[in-house]
Amino acid sequence: MIKARIVVTLKTGVLDPQGKAIESALQSFGIQDVGSVRQGKVFDVELAGSDTEQAETTLKAACEKLLANTVIENYAIEIA
Amino acid sequence: MRAAIVVFPGSNRDADVARALTLAGAEVVKVWHADSELPAGTDLAVLPGGFSYGDYLRCGAIAGRAAAMDAVRAHAARGGLVLGICNGFQILCESGLLPGVLMRNINRRFICHRQMLRVERADTRFTTAYTKGQVIDVCVAHGEGNFFADAETVARLEGDGRVAFRYSDAAGDLTEDANRNGSLNSIAGIYSEKLNVLGMMPHPENFVEDMLGGVDGRGLFQSLAA
């Protein structure tokens, strides 16, 4: 079995109201030195088989088809 | 006019839009999201408002890939009419039928109030009952209605006259206060390239009867049924 992690983040320059809210919450809780916060999503995925090249292709398709909206989001695939 | 309303798990405005279409004289049928075809003779496919799939992942993301959407895509490719309201607009963007994306409102709040819209053109299948520049009084109710697209896409939409409605004040001016979700260029609704697909965040179906506070939404359904 292959385990993979997909991280989806907003592209640079795309407004992130949730990240901004978290950023100001952290500051209001006295957590100092927090410059800026951007929120993203993490997907832990398990795939059958052991062919990591095939897994990479499958996961790329999953990101393009559903997991990321590439108008505003980037994705990164890490295979363990 | 035969309208097919696609119902997804979590759609909740299908009955309202059905009533608005029926009042305008259209014949309405409902289609389940897992159906892979629209009924024969469908002129208009409607994606109603609501919270399809609980807004999981991103608003409209999962619905945008449902089986019924392949049928809607084929219908649109044939030149058939498609109307997406609120969550329906989000679904159209996620399915690739319209460009851009509806992001979290700039003030991070769910907004729910009466809203003035400026009708940008009155020569499409959706707007002949209005006049160009007319200001209509409808409603908005959404948390993710902040229209965003890259600069090139927005320039193309503007250049090709594909903005259907903009958030305005009662005089038709595009003020910051009138654009509470923070949409680029105060965009409230857009058309596809061939003007046969319309996606809009506001709810014209809310205001089709005096009893409910207004009738400015009627024009859209009357235009379609004409």
Image: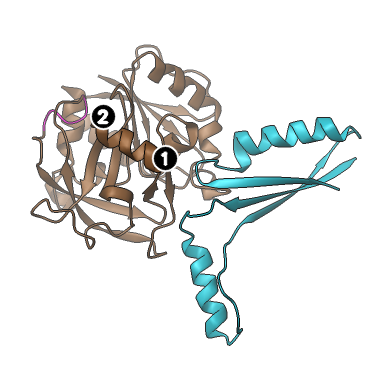
Chain colours: A cyan, B brown
Q: Quick check: A59 left or right of B72?
A: right
Looking at marks 1 and 2 on the same chain, the residue that comes earlier in the sequence is marked by: 1
Q: What amino acid does circle 1 point to?
A: Gly
- Is residue A57 within the magenta segment? no
Q: What residue is pinned by disc 1?
A: B100
Q: Quick check: B179 left or right of A28?
A: left
Q: Quick check: B28 left or right of B70?
A: left
- Is residue B127 within the magenta segment? yes
Circle 1 chain: B
**Residue interval drawn in magenta:** B125-129
Depicted B154 relative to depicted A11: above or below = above
**Among the 4 quarters of the image, the one containing residue B205:** top left
Packing grade of label 2 (10 A; few <14, some 14-19, many >=20) is few
**SS category of the residue bearing label 2:** loop
**Among the 4 quarters of the image, the one containing residue B88:** top left
Residue B12 drawn at (x, y percent)? 41, 45
**SS category of the residue bearing label 1:** loop
Q: Point out the image quarter for the N terminus of chain A.
A: top right
Name the residue rendered at 31%, 18% in the picture.
B43
Name the residue rendered at 34%, 16% in the picture.
B79
Nearer to us: label 1 or label 2:
2
Residue B135 visible at all: yes
- Callout 1 touching callout 2 (CB < 8 Å): no
* The one of B78 and B18 positioned closer to us in this rendering: B78
Residue B65 drawn at (x, y percent)? 55, 32
Depicted A13 relative to depicted B126: above or below = below
Residue A77 drawn at (x, y percent)? 74, 44
Circle 2 chain: B
Do the residues at discs 1 and 2 belong to one chain?
Answer: yes
> Which of the labelled discs sits on residue B78, or is there none?
none
> Which of the labelled discs sits on residue B160, or is there none?
2
